[in-house]
Image (cartoon, rainbow, N blue to C red):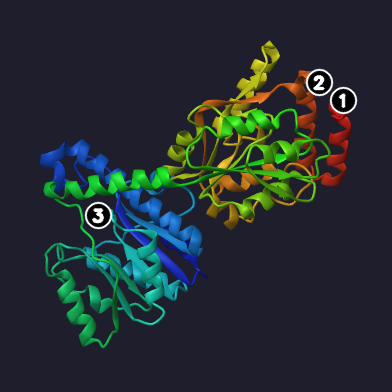
Amino acid sequence: MEVVYRLKGAGYRQRLIIFTRYPEPGKTKTRLTPALGSEGAAELQRRMTEHVVGRARRFARERQILVEVQYDGGGRRRMRRWLGRDFSYSRQDVGDIGQRMANAFQEAFAAGAEQAVLIGTDCPGITPEILFEAFDALDGTDVVLGPATDGGYYLIGLRSPIKALFAGLPWGTGEVIGKTLDVARELGCSISFVNTLDDVDNPEDLVVWETEERRARQELEAERITIVIPTLNEASTLAAAIDRAKKGRNIEIIVADGGSSDNTLGIAESRGVKVVVAPGGRAKQENAAAAAAMGEILLFLHADTHLPNGFDGHIRRVLAEPRTAGGAFLLSIDATNLSLRVIERAANLRSKLLQMPYGDQALFMRTSLFRAMGGFPDMPIMEDFVFVRRLRKRGAVVIAPVPITTSARRWLALGVWRTTIINQAVILAYYIGAPLDTVARWYRAARSPLR
């Protein structure tokens, strides 16, 4: 079963392989146990792996390559639950580290890869830029190496399997990279290098991790959030939504208008936000705004919805988790009706259990992932529903632990249960394959009291 799963990567020209270990106390980072204890050493292993995997994920979304996590300990289900569903997982083969790496490369090239790079998780200084440089170097060289300051290496890239590079080396010593270079030169291989990095193996190395973890937090805070607000005649609600959104740090706001005939555009311009005008239809409007976005993160916000205080921090923390593809907020409806409390609870339960939040809950994800997925499907209705179903295949859809507040106007205008029945009827129509243009027309007619 392991081999079958690995061959799912067939057809990818490039492959990134990550060697790591499931963080079990007493079995990981044992040289750090005297300083941290077995639980602390396992926790460090978890955090360092998540750190490197997060940077690898950012690289992979830009490069569109296969990432395979080869692990020791744990199991595939545990690894997927821990690090996310968007990677391939396989257990490392038996043998010393050299044999395992040689086998990993052999399998990658047997599955059709033309370039493969293998990294570990002991050097937290690895970045997407280093990975780009390594793969680019393989266009013109046989072997690329990322030296570690202790005399080993944290990265090796090949464009064909070379078993001799891994045979009989003094693994775990400061002679590894020197011996590897000797073998490569004897074989007539051309060699390139990427940055030398510090690794974290011993108590005195912990300062390296602390420095990189602090840098990672700063990088996270530096990521801009682009807030996209689709509008069509939202003059009565837009100003408050923009004003609340402006309380976030390092944000950009884009109003994506679909042809408003009221003062929606005037309000947007008076608030100093960017305006994108697109053909009517929420999917078209949001995709047009996303194409113009400058932020690394996208947040899609309805004009009658108010973001919670500190929303930006919640978004960045959710997206920092390695298994996360996107997220949304808990739902709060701005009214006191008991029936609306039932709707809130049902929506929040559905969101948590099924990972299926809808547009009222302000979907967010990384811009690179949104673009890699092709944006919202060009549909007259249900675009957010279909998008989230696709998003779940890329990783977890996490609900931030704070509520977003949306207007009760459509529930109050039509009645709570009539609105709920209409919404569920649209979902049912989608599942039975009804023509979406017809469903959209019926939906607009059913909601006509709002117009």
Who comes first in sequence, dot 3 or dot 2? 3
Which one is in front in this view, the residue at disc 1 or the one at disc 3? Answer: 1
Q: Which element type, helix, strand or loop, lies under badge 1?
A: helix
Q: Quadrant of the N terminus?
A: bottom left
Who comes first in sequence, dot 1 or dot 2? 2
Question: From the viewer's perspective, is 44 left or right of 451?
Answer: left
Location of mark 2 (residue): 413
Q: Which amino acid does label 1 sit on?
A: Pro
Residue 18 percent across, percent down from the top left = 35, 59
Residue 47 percent across, percent down from the top left = 30, 44
Q: Residues within 10 Å of mark 3 (few under 14, many from 20)?
A: many
Location of mark 1 (residue): 449
Q: Which amino acid does label 3 sit on?
A: Asp
Q: Which amino acid does label 2 sit on?
A: Ala
Residue 305 percent across, percent down from the top left = 65, 29
Q: In which quarter of the image is the C terminus?
A: top right
Q: How crowded is mark 2: few (under 14 residues within 10 Å), some or many (20 or more)?
A: some
Location of mark 3 (residue): 122
Q: What residue is shown at x 32% (from left), y 49% (from top)?
A: 49
Residue 51: give its label.
Answer: none
Which one is in front in this view, the residue at disc 3 or the one at disc 2? Answer: 2
Q: Which element type, helix, strand or loop, lies under badge 2?
A: helix
Are discs 1 and 2 less than 8 Å apart at CB?
yes
